[in-house]
Image (spheres, helix red, strand yellow):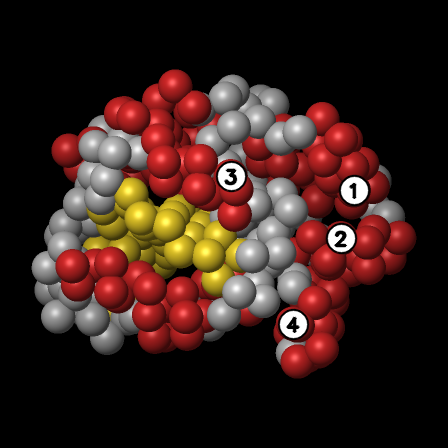
Amino acid sequence: MLHYDESGNHSKPSLIFSGSLLFGAGGFDALIPMLENNFHIVRLDVHGHGQSGVRVPLILEEMAEDFYELLNRLDLREPVWVGHSIGGMLGLRIVCKHPDFFSALVLIAALARLDPPDLREQTWQLWEAFHAGQRTTIADAALPFFFAKATFREQPELIQRNRDLILKFSDAENVFQSARAVFERTDFTEFLPRIAIPTLVIAGREDLGASPAEAQFIAEHVPDARLVVVEEANHLVPLEKPRQVAEEMRKFLKGLSLDC
């Protein structure tokens, strides 16, 4: 069973938010209030996060289809998928298979290609430690993958809040199944030219996992895409720089006559 909640203006275009591993829909907490006066907001819980259930094994293509079936039952106007990290990977797959359903696509810290082997090994070890309950061991090692150096200096309360989230996380098993789906995904490169709707690709300058180079690769292969790289931001760019992300989204959507 998949969970979602709605807010904002139901008479406006619908922004469908799908969040990252671990941080889930909470990764949009600072961003959504800047947008909900002008849009209908649908916030999804990815499988194994929040109140959404999980099945084993999880496969990204099947997860995307689950969300398509859910969205088909909702009253949506000119829906735009806004995907962060795994949410972006799901967005690529759902839009590729159902291009006529969506008006636009926003990808934040998303990947199309597979991870380099050394980075994959390093991050997988952190996930295995998280799964094994070694939260204190991995928290400080994991945070530099998520937040930029400037965020550590200038927003220590944000760092502490998300460190606490890692330490106190209660349902590691279900989230781990979604992480496994990401690590076992297929390369999406050959399908990028089939993304037939306007696409905004956003990356944090200091993101090692979903790097600006990977974002540029997506933008170069999607026919109607534009790239934005946010300075002094890492993988959790919607939390670090919500005002800039909101501004870029509104410019993009206004150019498509989707923002009033």
Q: Does dot 4 land on a helix, a strand or a loop?
A: helix
Q: Which residue is mark 1?
A: 126
Specify whether 210 is left or right of 162: left
Q: Amino acid at mark 3?
A: Glu
Q: Residue at x 60, y 23 (%)?
A: 184
Q: Quadrant of residue 67?
A: top left
Q: Which mark is residue 214?
A: 3
In contact (CB < 8 Å): disc 1 and disc 2: yes
Q: Does dot 3 land on a helix, a strand or a loop?
A: helix
Q: Does dot 1 land on a helix, a strand or a loop?
A: helix
Q: Residue at x 12, y 70 (%)?
A: 260
- Tell which of 233 and 172 is nearer to you: 233
Of circles 4 and 1, the one toward us is: 4
Of circles 2 and 4, the one toward us is: 4
Q: Which mark is residue 151?
A: 4
Nearer the N terminus, badge 4 or badge 1?
1
- Tell which of 125 and 135 is nearer to you: 125
Can residue 50 be seen here? The reply is no
Q: Amino acid at mark 4?
A: Thr
Image x and y of residue 36, in percent: 28, 71
Mark 1 surroundings: few (<14), some (14-19) or many (≥20) residues within 10 A:
some
In contact (CB < 8 Å): disc 4 and disc 3: no
Nearer the N terminus, badge 1 or badge 2?
1
State the CA–CA distance, disc 3 to disc 2: 20 Å
Mark 4 surroundings: few (<14), some (14-19) or many (≥20) residues within 10 A:
many
Q: Which residue is mark 2?
A: 142
The N terminus, quarter of image: top left
